[in-house]
Image (spheres, rainbow, N blue to C red):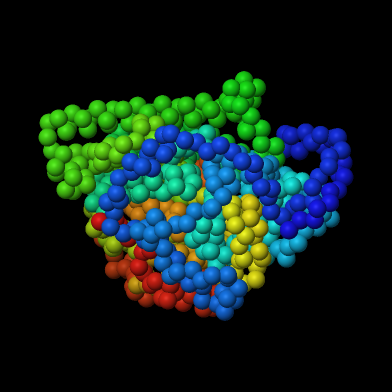
């Protein structure tokens, strides 16, 4: 895909994003599309191989991910048809890339330096040429000024509106990303993990944090850990967490908010940062449900929250660095770079906490087994006194090291509390905006009608709160966590609809933010908050399968998030208690601005004034809603309500039902 000749380019000494570009002439290969083949790297041996050989058999019955055949005629441009559904049982059938050096996480070469390029770099890349029909983003300096303090997903959306659903983003003299926002292309890329694509950049940039954990491992190593960890999130476990953990933790948060409001002269707590409250509550929930440990983050200092944000921000920054200095030896970086030192210190905090919890749990399991009772656990896959994921994994007697357990659970700790807290923050922001007053009224009417005088919903109540769940899904649509996935092609692949050919070794950004906000996916009001855009409530809840891949909040295919039900029910529980008992208004004059640290954060918090809501044990006749006939309160465009959930795509069936 690239001519063989080279071009002399002189880069002037120019400060950009804290990096000084050298003024020496450079001989630059003509390569703006695709990546150089990585040099051979010795594969790690020993521990991982032992783990792979000793991995236990999967105890899950079925965990389904969602795949739907593209319906358009243009899908014929795809080289091979995708099966209708990817099944967790097929995990052993994945044919991983034949070139281990190109696919291994230990490959540190990859596409090299990556950073959204200003207009001069775009022009240079156009001059270099290259055989590709994929349009090149017209990246201007004003698009990305201050990018490191904001979020890459924002200019990616702008460039999509200018260049189309698939475009090339030059990121350096010999590097680039293909940015993908088309539903069928995203389906093809995510479904073909292992055989055609790997996670790539993010797996390399995040290894310092996640280690050997399931979140960012690749290929065979990932497969073994996935089979070990995913079954722990089974149906009985989720039911128990809703009743014992989600509701009580949400109640603790609301009690504290109302106690603070009660001492104020007017009964209102001023300038309350709900982003912090959601993060603290989500950490408490993850601590109890994963480790059987209460961080008590709402009432005491929890350094792990700041450590998590610092580490995730570093992961994002590394994946987008113009000059990847983080590839230098860690002792050197720790000595000379304050940023790297802060990141390494943050990881040390997280690892210290998780390591201690793993060792404490191991001792507890040994004591329990010495006293008897192992047979009951083997029958039920659940310990009633300690139903945590950590207890499950240890009692399963899998022969893995404490470090492996720590890294797996660290993945759940870091990813689990960050993502849900961010969805709640931005969803709350939307519900409190004046233009969404009707959506908030409907939500509180449903809570009054279903919960009555209950302090929090139980598992059985969740199915009776479809509008609440729609609100959570709409928040994930507008603010997906994370907003962008990275992939790297390991073979050449032709995208559907004649949108281009991806060469082997090409880095890719799968922009879920673009997909979810695109007018082509969700109509002219695609950037407005409207929970009823997914169609009548009787149609159920949206997922990638029943929306034709226009909505992909939990990824898809082999690497689909196994914790989707956990996240949705956790978020619903927190919102149910909060909006039933608390009235909130946004603080006037405080701008809530998006930034990112792997997930979408606020720049300066999400501030509200909060006071006790008048308790309603049932909805008044005048407030009762005909839920079966409910339609969007906003004009979302002709035909888009009917298209919200497409029956052919699976109706209301969840693509990943609970593991039995």
The residue at the far top in this view is: 335
Q: Is residue 657 visible?
A: yes
Residue 20's image quarter? top right
Check the image and report above or below for 235 versus 354.
below
Whether residue 456 sits left or right of residue 147 in the image: it is left
- Dividing the image into 4 quarters, which one contains the C terminus? bottom left
Image point (31%, 28%), residue name = 359
Q: Name which residue lies at 42% across and 52% down.
A: 561
Res 444 visible: no
On screen, residue 647 above or below 250: below
Quadrant for the N terminus, please: bottom right
Seen at 41% across and 39% down, the residue is 49
Look at the picture and state if 157 lies above or below 596.
Answer: below
User: Residue 467 in the image: x percent, y percent?
Assistant: 37, 63
* Residue 647 image position (x, y, % from top left): 41, 75
Tell which of 59 and 377 is nearer to you: 59
Q: Residue at x 58, y 26 (%)?
A: 330
| 230 displayed left or right of 193 | left
Which of the 4 image quadrants contains residue 14? top right
Residue 326 in the image: x percent, y percent?
62, 32
Q: Residue 253: x, y in percent?
A: 35, 40
| 614 or 120, nearer to the observer | 120
- Comparing 246 with 153, the one in front is 153
State which quadrant residue 319 falls in.
top right
Q: Nearer the viewer, residue 568 or 235?
A: 235
């Amino acid at each position: 895909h690239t001519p063989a000749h080279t071009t002399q380019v002189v880069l002037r000494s120019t400060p950009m994003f804290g990096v000084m570009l050298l003024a020496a002439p450079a001989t630059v290969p003509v390569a703006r599309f695709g990546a150089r083949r990585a040099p051979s790297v010795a594969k790690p041996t020993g521990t991982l191989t032992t783990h792979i050989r000793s991995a236990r058999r999967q105890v899950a019955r079925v965990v389904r991910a969602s795949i739907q055949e593209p319906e358009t005629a243009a899908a014929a441009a795809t080289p091979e048809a995708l099966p209708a559904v990817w099944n967790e049982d097929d995990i052993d059938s994945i044919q991983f890339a034949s070139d281990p050096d190109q696919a291994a996480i230990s490959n540190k070469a990859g596409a090299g330096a990556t950073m959204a390029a200003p207009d001069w770099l775009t022009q240079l890349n156009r001059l270099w040429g290259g055989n590709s029909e994929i349009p090149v983003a017209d990246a201007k300096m004003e698009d990305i000024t201050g990018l490191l303090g904001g979020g890459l997903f924002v200019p990616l959306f702008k460039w999509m509106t200018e260049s189309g659903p698939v475009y090339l983003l030059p990121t350096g003299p010999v590097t680039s990303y293909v940015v993908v926002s088309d539903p069928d292309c995203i389906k093809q890329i995510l479904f073909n993990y292992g055989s055609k694509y790997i996670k790539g950049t993010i797996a390399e940039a995040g290894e310092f944090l996640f280690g050997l954990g399931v979140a960012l491992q690749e290929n065979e190593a990932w497969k073994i850990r996935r089979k070990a960890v995913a079954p722990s999130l089974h149906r009985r476990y989720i039911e128990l967490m809703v009743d014992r953990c989600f509701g009580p933790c949400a109640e603790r948060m609301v009690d504290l908010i109302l106690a603070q409001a009660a001492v104020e002269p007017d009964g209102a707590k001023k300038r309350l940062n709900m982003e912090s409250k959601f993060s603290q509550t989500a950490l408490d929930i993850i601590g109890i449900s994963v480790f059987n440990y209460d961080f008590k983050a709402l009432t005491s200092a929890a350094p792990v929250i700041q450590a998590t944000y610092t580490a995730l921000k570093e992961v994002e920054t590394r994946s987008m660095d113009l000059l990847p200095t983080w590839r230098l030896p860690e002792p050197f970086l720790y000595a000379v770079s304050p940023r790297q030192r802060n990141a390494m210190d943050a990881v040390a905090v997280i690892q210290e906490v998780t390591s201690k919890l793993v060792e404490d749990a191991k001792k507890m399991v040994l004591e329990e087994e010495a006293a008897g009772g192992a047979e009951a656990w083997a029958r039920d896959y659940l310990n009633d006194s300690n139903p945590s994921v950590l207890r499950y994994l240890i009692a399963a007697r899998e022969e893995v090291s404490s470090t492996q357990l720590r890294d797996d659970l660290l993945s759940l700790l870091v990813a689990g509390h960050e993502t849900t807290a961010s969805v709640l923050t931005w969803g709350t922001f939307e519900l409190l905006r004046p233009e969404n007053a009707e959506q908030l009224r409907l939500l509180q009417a449903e809570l009054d009608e279903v919960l009555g005088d209950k302090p929090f919903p139980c598992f059985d109540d969740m199915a009776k709160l479809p509008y609440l769940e729609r609100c959570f899904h709409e928040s994930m649509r507008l603010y997906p966590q994370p907003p962008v996935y990275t992939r790297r092609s390991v073979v050449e692949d032709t995208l559907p609809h004649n949108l281009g050919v991806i060469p082997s070794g090409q880095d890719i950004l799968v922009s879920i933010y673009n997909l979810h906000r695109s007018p082509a996916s969700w109509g002219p009001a695609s950037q407005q908050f409207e929970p009823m855009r997914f169609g009548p409530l009787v149609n159920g809840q949206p997922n990638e399968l029943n929306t034709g891949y226009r909505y992909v909040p939990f990824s898809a295919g082999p690497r689909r998030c196994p914790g989707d039900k956990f996240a949705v029910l956790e978020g619903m529980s927190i919102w149910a208690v909060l909006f039933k008992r608390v009235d909130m208004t946004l603080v006037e004059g405080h701008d809530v601005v998006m930034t990112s640290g792997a997930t979408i954060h606020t720049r300066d918090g999400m501030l509200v004034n909060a006071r006790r809501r008048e308790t309603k044990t049932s909805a008044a006749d005048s407030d009762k809603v005909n839920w079966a006939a409910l339609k969007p309160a906003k004009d979302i465009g002709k035909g888009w309500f009917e298209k919200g959930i497409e029956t052919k795509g699976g109706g209301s069936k969840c693509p990943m039902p609970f593991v039995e």
